[in-house]
Amino acid sequence: MYKKEKMSMNKKAQVTIFIILALAIILVLVLLFVGRDSLTTLITGETPVNQIKSCISESFTPALEVIRLQGGSLNPQNYYLYQDNKIDYLCYTEENYKRCVMQKPLLKQSIEKELGEYISPRAISCIEAVKSSLQDKGYQVSSKTPEITVSLIPGAIILDIKSDLRITKDGTETYESIKIDESSGLYGHVMVASSISNWEAKYGDSETMNYMIYYPNLKVEKKKQGDGTTVYILTDRTNLEQFMFASRSIVVPAGVTGE
């Protein structure tokens, strides 16, 4: 009985050794046929395109956070300072008792344009860095100045980078377009912010409860400030993603009771 068990263990050990040897042979063959760089790509998934995407995302993510906390602008010109954030006025008037005027009636398009302009030079730097790295390894790489389109859609932000990237060594790989899909609720927040601003422009004040009834996952906070400004904070209850913006409409001067 003992001898049978020992023979069985020896056979298992031999099978294990054969499997290890087979894997080692396969690894050597892969190195010979696809090269070390390609093997690294197969193992890690770090293709040149993925490297470019990762590089661009590193710049895009912080910019997106600023956009959300500053009323849809990276560099607001007409803003209210709230908790150290320059919150852009989406609807504004300087006059008392007057309804505000929409400052960005096409807020979605304005954000898309601003993000595109911001990310363009950074995308160029990312592509050039990857090109330089590949050329150092003996690749021939060409591309054109990227054309960048940013699109806000429900649940995501799409970056479409057209650069006609061509990578040549043993063969040629061509990437006419590089697309980055960032999960985000910004589209929904922008639609609600535009609706609230439009309502204030028409009637002077908005009823936030209606939005929370219609969108159960949305929390709408309305913070009245001393100068007549209203700061709105939209919060997704599921992931706590926020969008903040300001409005100034139908302002009653301090000390006036309206009687």
Image: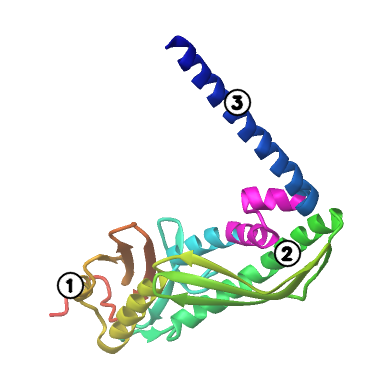
In the rendered image, the quadrant that contains the C terminus is bottom left
* Magenta residues (range): 37-58
Q: Residue at 65%, 52% (x, y): give it.
A: 42
Q: Which residue is mark 3?
A: 14
Residue 96 visible in image: no
Q: How is the image coloured?
A: rainbow
The residue most toward the top is 2
Could you say where residue 45 lies in the image, as x and y percent from the top left? 62, 53
| Towards the viewer: 2 or 93 | 2
Image point (39%, 74%), residue name: 154
* Vertical order, 230 against 56 (above or below): below
Count residues near mark 2 (Cα–Cα under 10 Å), then give few for <14, some for 14-19, many for 20+.
many
User: Compared with residue 63, is residue 176 higher up or lower down, i.e. above or below?
Assistant: below
What is the x, y in percent for residue 107? 45, 80
**Helix, strand or loop at disc 1?**
helix
The answer to whether 75 appears left or right of 202 in the picture is right
Q: Secondary structure at mark 3?
A: helix
- Residue 198 point in image, percent of width and height: 33, 85
The residue nearer to you, when weighing 121 against 91, is 121
Where is 37 relative to 100, above or below? above
Is residue 48 inside the magenta stretch? yes
Going by the numbered disc 2, the residue's amino acid type is: Ile
Quadrant position of residue 120: bottom right
Q: Residue at x 85, y 54 (%)?
A: 136
Q: Nearer the viewer, mark 3 or mark 2?
A: 3
Q: Which residue is mark 1?
A: 213
Image quadrant where one finds the N terminus: top left
Tell me which amino acid carries mark 3: Gln
